[in-house]
Amino acid sequence: DCLLSRGLGDVYKRQIDDKAFMMVGGSGAGVGSAASTVDLAAGLTTVGDYAFYRFPGTLTITAGAALTSVGSFAFSGTDHDVDSQIDLSAATLLATVGVHAFDGFLGVLTVVATTNWQEIPDYTFHNAANPESTFDFEGATALARIGESAFVHVAGQITLTATNVLVELGNSVFNSASHPDSVVTLTGAAITSLPNALFISFKGTIMYTADANLQTIGEDAFNYADNPASVVDLLAVGAQTTTGDNFLLGVNTFYFFKGVLHFKQPARMTSVAESTFAYARHADSTLDLTTGGLTTIASYAFHQAKGKITLTSDEVASVGTSAFQDTPHSESVLTLTGSPIAAIEKDVFLSLIHISEPTRQE
C-alpha cells in the first residue's frame, strides 16, 4: 500500500489487492523505458517522494479513495509520455501533497480536491502542460495556503473558490496559467496581501472583491491578466482608517489588466507607483483617488488607462512622465489645485480628454 522512494532507481514488484504494480525508487534515477506502463492498484495509500521522478514511460493511474499522500517530486520531471493519465478524482482522503509533486507532468492530470486539502505547496502543479488536465478545487473549503508558483504555466482548467480560511498566497501562484475557461474566485479570502506576479498573464477569469483588511498588492499582480470577464473590486479598501502602515500598490500592478477594476483610494495611500494602472483596458473601470493625501504620482501611473479616473489632492509634489497620457474616458476629472508641484514632467496630460482645476490651458 505504499510506494517507497529509496533505492537509487531499483525497481520492485509487489502484489496488492491481486494487482501488481511497479514500485519505483527515486533520487532522480529516471528509471523505466519509453515503453513502460504502470498501473497502480486502487488500494494504494501513499506515493513516496520521487517515486516516479523523471519516469520516461506511460503512467496510467486511477487512485482510489484510500490514497492519502503524494510525496514531493513524486511525478515530477518532463520525461513522462503525453499519453500518461493520473486520475485523483476519487481520492477523497488525499490530504498531503508534497512540493513539486506534479511539476512538469505532461500527461492528463485530473484533480478533484475535497475538504482534506489544506495546502497546495510550492510548485505543486508547476509546468503541468496538458490542456486536457482539470484542477477542481471548488470543494477545498479548508484550503489555507497556496504556495509559490503552484500553478505556473498550467495549461489545464483551474476552478477554485476561496473561503475565509485562505490566509496565504505565494508569489506567482497563477502566473501564465493558460486555460481560458479557468475561474479563480478569491472573494471572501482572509488575505491581507496579494503577492507579486499573482495573476501575471493569467488567461482565465478572476473574481475578487477585497475587504478592508487588504494592505498590499504586489508588483505585476494582475499584469497582463487578459480576460475581460474578470472583475476586481477594491472599493472596500477605501474605508481603511488613517492609522497603521501605508497601503501599497506595486509597480505594474494592473498593467494591461483587461478586466473591470474598481478602486477606492484608502486614506493611508500616499503614492501611485510607476505604471500601476497603465494600459488597464476596460472602459467600465473606475479609479477613485479623491480621498486626499496623495503626494507622488510616478511615471506612466495611469498611462492609457481606459476607465474613469477621478483624482483630488492638494498635496501632490511630483507627477512623473506620461502619468496621465492618453487616458480617454470623457468623465475623468483631475483636481490638483493647491498641490505644491515643483515640476510636471513631459507628456503628463498629453491627449487627456478632460481636466478641471486647473484648466487645460493652465
Image (cartoon, rainbow, N blue to C red):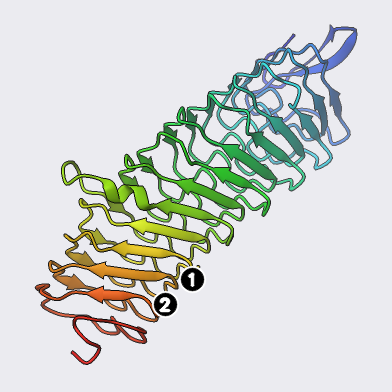
Looking at the rendered structure, the secondary structure element under dot 2 is: loop
Left or right: residue 40 versus residue 331 is right
Q: Is residue 261 above or below residue 326?
A: above
Disc number placed over residue 329 in the picture, else none = 2
Q: Is residue 259 left or right of residue 311?
A: right
Determine if residue 332 is in view.
yes
Around disc 1, counting alpha carbons within 10 Å, would you say few (fewer than 14), some (14 to 19), or many (20 or more)? some
Q: Position of residue 179 (x, y in %)?
A: 67, 51
- The image quarter containing residue 123 is top right
Residue 315 percent location from the top left of the image: 12, 66
Left or right of 356, for residue 121: right
Q: Quadrant of residue 255?
A: bottom left
Kind of residue at badge 2: His
Badge 2, how many Cα within 10 Å: few under 14, some, many 20+? Answer: some
| Position of the N terminus by quadrant | top right
Q: Is residue 323 visible?
A: no
Residue at the image point whose x is 65% and y is 27% from the top? 113
Q: Quadrant of residue 126?
A: top right
Q: Nearer the viewer, residue 7 or 217?
A: 217
Q: Is 344 situated above or below 90?
A: below
Q: Position of residue 329 (x, y in %)?
A: 41, 77
For this rendering, which residue is in front, 155 or 8? 155
- Left or right position of 5 against 319: right
Q: Residue at x 65, y 42 (%)?
A: 158
With respect to residue 214, does 354 lie above or below?
A: below
**Mark 1, residue position:** 283
Question: Image point 29% across, 72% down: which residue?
Answer: 299
Which circle's residue, 2 or 1, is located before the other in the chain?
A: 1
